[in-house]
Image (cartoon, helix red, strand yellow):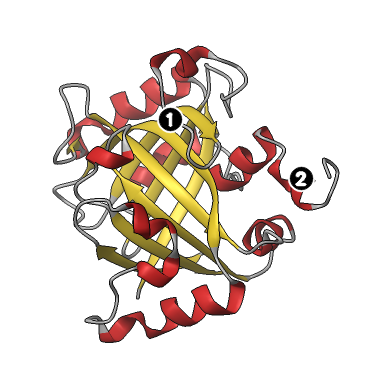
Amino acid sequence: MAGRIELKYLVDPATKERLLARWRPYLVAAPYTDELAMYPIMSLYFDSPSLRFYDEKLEGEALRSKVRLRGYGYDWQALDPCILEVKGKVNQRILKFRKNLGPFRPEYLHPAHWPLDDDPSAGPVRALALRHRLRPAVQVLYRRETYESPFCPGLRVAFDSQLLALEVGELMTPDKVDDIRYRCLPEDRFVFEIKSNGGLPTWILQGIHDGQVLLRSISKYVLAIEKLNLHRREMGVYA
C-alpha cells in the first residue's frame, strides 16, 4: 500500500468553473476520458453485517477502512477491468491496495472468490475480509470529470456529479439519473477532490484559498447508505 493525500470539498458549478479557469495552464484531461474529460464510475462497496466501516466513518476514527469493487461503466457484466480497492485511512494519509481482477465475474460478489492467491501483498486484504465477514452493501454510480498536471506527477483534480445510490443487484437505467429516490446530492453540487502522492503545489493552494473553498468530510459510501436507509435496516428499524 502506498501513502497518498486525498482532500474533498463540496462546490457549486460557478466555483468549479472559476477553479478550472484559474488552473487551466497547469492541467490536462486525464487519460481515458471523453471530450469533456469525463467517464462513468461504478463502485460496489463491501461492509460487515453490522456496517462496521460505515460506523467508523461516522465516528471519525483515525484508523478506518473501505473496501470496494470498481469499474468504469454502468453495467457490471460488461466491466473489464474490474478493480478491487481496499483503502485504509490514517488521519489525512490514504493507504490503498489496488488489484485488477480482469473482467467482472458474479463470484466476485463473495470475497472468498477474489483471485488474490498469486499476490503476496494481499494477506491483509484476505484477513480484513474474514475478520469482518464482508458482503456487498451498496452500489454507487457517478460521472467523474478529472484532470492531471504534467508539472506535478501523481496530482489529480476531479469533480464528481450525478451521484446515485442503488441496492445491491439493482440495475442502472437512464431514468434513475434524474430520480430523487436515487440521487445522493443536489443537481447543483459537485464533490471536488484533490489527490496527490506528495505535497500540493502553490497554485493549487492559492486557488483553494482565494476561492474560499472549505474542506469537507464527504463519503460517497455514507451518502449512499443513508440515501437508501440501509443503516436503519441494519439496526432493525425495518425488521
The residue under the point 50% across, 13% down is: 178
- Report x, y in % for residue 43: 41, 45
The residue under the point 49% across, 82% down is: 127
Q: Is residue 211 visible?
A: no
Q: Relative to residue 75, is residue 49 depicted above or below?
A: below
Q: Amino acid at mark 2?
A: Arg
Q: Amino acid at mark 1?
A: Leu
User: In the image shown, does 156 or 55 lie closer to the viewer?
Assistant: 55
The residue under the point 74% across, 61% down is: 59
Identify the disc placed on residue 59. none
Q: Residues within 10 Å of mark 2 (few under 14, many from 20)?
A: few
Please indicate whether residue 183 sits to the left or right of residue 55 in the image: left
User: In the image shown, does 37 or 196 lie closer to the viewer?
Assistant: 37
- Report x, y in % for residue 231: 73, 47
Residue identified by numbered label 1: 171
Q: Relative to residue 239, is residue 129 depicted above or below?
A: below
Secondary structure of residue under mark 1: loop
Number of labels in the image equals 2
- Report x, y in % for residue 6: 44, 55
Residue identified by numbered label 2: 233
